[in-house]
Image: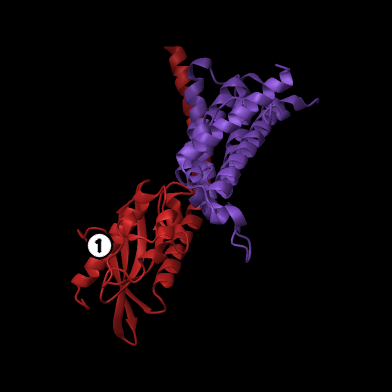
């Protein structure tokens, strides 16, 4: 009995010291990480806005894939939308922002957070990856299968088809959502 | 104080953790798709292995045998979490590139293996030398596999972006004729098999068999 209590106290002391150092590290890194994620989101919104004026955000509930919308305006008139999209990739949840014209054509998109496999699915965060979806969703359907891509694009997503399909479905859902708005809210 | 340099050098070739002891294969196969990932993972393993060896060796007379595994796991998991938080805050590009493999250092057999087989039975100084040697061996193996896989599978070598350099070097012939399977899991297993066979052959040759 005494031996077990001694063991428990030893483990408790190791855990307490570990908790202290973890708390210390967290107190230093948490503000930096929070600031970085705010900056990354602002940078992503700026990048996908295509130079249009970024309006206010409206949060959505119970809309598949679409978490929020942000109006894009030009000269006081609505010119498009930025949608906050969420989808399930190979490694778990992925969040992205994508901008659309009023007719539902996707213009720019950027991955905000993901847990995809390094070197494979994580390539979705590379610049240029989202180009294959540009101008799709209105007159041209969003490519949701490998067969709908050019040979070079299909080769580029080798080994990360699940990631590609997840992003494509989210972009297609975003496009449908924008089309459902009928050119204005 | 006399340093036992053998403890440092053994991990590089004679007891290479990847090709000879065959430890930590999960991250080796997982992150070896790009050279930059291999370098980032090696840095994480160096930090965790070094400090876990130091702590385990320093506490070896304090931690009873019956609870040494949970105690080591607490130490290693805490070190990995600290590494993860620091990388997320200060080297976000490497943090994103390593993805799920960074927290998985907790279950990397090299860390627990060295704590159990070496640090818990040796002095702090020898444990430091062992950690550095094993980390160098791990880093060299991982970088070698990543370089071959990335070169053959993508025709590129990806380092870290600096100034106007975007970090990606395109290798002319391979860039236009990539062998895609090398970027995928079967390519990693194939290459691992060839390299292990080479190490085995080399060891046998040195022994004169």
**Which image quadrant is residue B130 in?**
top right
Q: Residue at the spot x=76%, y=27% of the render? A: B5
Question: What is the number of callouts on the image?
Answer: 1
Please identify the residue farthest to the bottom as the structure is shown: A75
- Tell me residue B19's x, y (percent): 60, 29
Q: Nearer the viewer, residue A135 or A153?
A: A153
Note whether residue B18 is visible. Answer: no
Q: Nearer the viewer, residue B58 or B38?
A: B38
Q: Residue at the spot x=58%, y=36% of the render? A: B48
**Which image quadrant is residue A94 in?**
bottom left
Please identify the residue farthest to the right as the structure is shown: B2
Q: Is residue A20 left or right of residue B124?
A: left
Note whether residue A183 is visible. Answer: yes
- Tell me residue A76's x, y (percent): 31, 86
- Tell me residue A61's x, y (percent): 21, 60
Q: Which residue is mark 1?
A: A173
Chain B colour as displayed: purple
Q: Is residue B98 left or right of residue A142?
A: right
Q: Is residue B59 left or right of residue A137?
A: right
- Tell me residue A137's x, y (percent): 28, 68
**Which image quadrant is residue A83 in?**
bottom left
- Chain that is red in the image: A
Q: Nearer the viewer, residue B169 or A181?
A: B169
The answer to whether residue A88 is above or below residue B142 is below
Secondary structure state at the residue bearing disc 1: helix
Q: Quadrant of the N terminus of chain B?
A: top right
């Amino acid at each position: 009995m005494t031996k077990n209590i001694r063991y428990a106290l030893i483990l408790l002391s190791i855990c307490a010291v570990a908790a202290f150092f973890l708390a210390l590290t967290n107190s230093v890194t948490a503000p930096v990480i929070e600031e970085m994620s705010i900056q990354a989101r602002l940078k992503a919104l700026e990048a996908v806005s295509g130079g249009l004026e970024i309006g206010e955000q409206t949060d959505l509930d119970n809309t598949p894939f679409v978490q929020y919308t942000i109006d894009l305006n030009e000269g006081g008139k609505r010119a498009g939308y930025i949608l906050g999209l969420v989808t399930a990739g190979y490694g778990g949840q992925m969040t992205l922002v994508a901008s659309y014209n009023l007719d539902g054509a996707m213009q720019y998109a950027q991955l905000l957070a993901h847990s995809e496999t390094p070197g494979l699915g994580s390539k979705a965060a590379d610049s240029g990856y989202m180009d294959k979806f540009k101008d799709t969703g209105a007159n041209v359907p969003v490519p949701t299968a490998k067969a709908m891509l050019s040979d070079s694009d299909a080769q580029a997503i080798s080994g990360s088809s699940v990631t590609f399909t997840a992003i494509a479905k989210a972009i297609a859902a975003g496009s449908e959502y924008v089309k459902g708005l009928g050119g204005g809210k | 104080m006399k340093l036992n340099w053998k403890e440092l050098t053994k991990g590089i070739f004679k007891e290479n953790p990847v090709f000879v002891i065959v430890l930590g294969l999960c991250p080796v196969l997982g992150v070896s798709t790009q050279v930059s990932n291999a370098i980032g993972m090696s840095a994480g393993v160096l930090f965790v292995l070094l400090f876990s060896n130091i702590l385990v060796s320093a506490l070896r007379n304090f931690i009873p045998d019956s609870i040494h595994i949970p105690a080591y796991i607490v130490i290693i998991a805490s070190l990995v979490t600290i590494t993860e938080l620091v990388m997320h805050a200060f080297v976000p590009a490497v943090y994103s590139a390593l993805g799920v493999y960074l927290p998985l250092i907790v279950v990397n057999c090299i860390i627990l293996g060295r704590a159990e087989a070496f640090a818990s039975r040796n002095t702090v100084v020898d444990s430091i030398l062992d950690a550095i040697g094993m980390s160098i061996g791990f880093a060299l193996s991982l970088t070698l596999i990543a370089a071959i896989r990335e070169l053959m599978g993508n025709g590129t070598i990806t380092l870290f972006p600096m100034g106007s350099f975007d970090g990606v070097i395109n290798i002319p012939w391979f860039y236009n004729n990539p062998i895609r399977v090398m970027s995928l899991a079967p390519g990693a297993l194939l290459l691992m098999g060839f390299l292990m066979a080479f190490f085995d052959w080399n060891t046998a040759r040195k022994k004169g068999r």
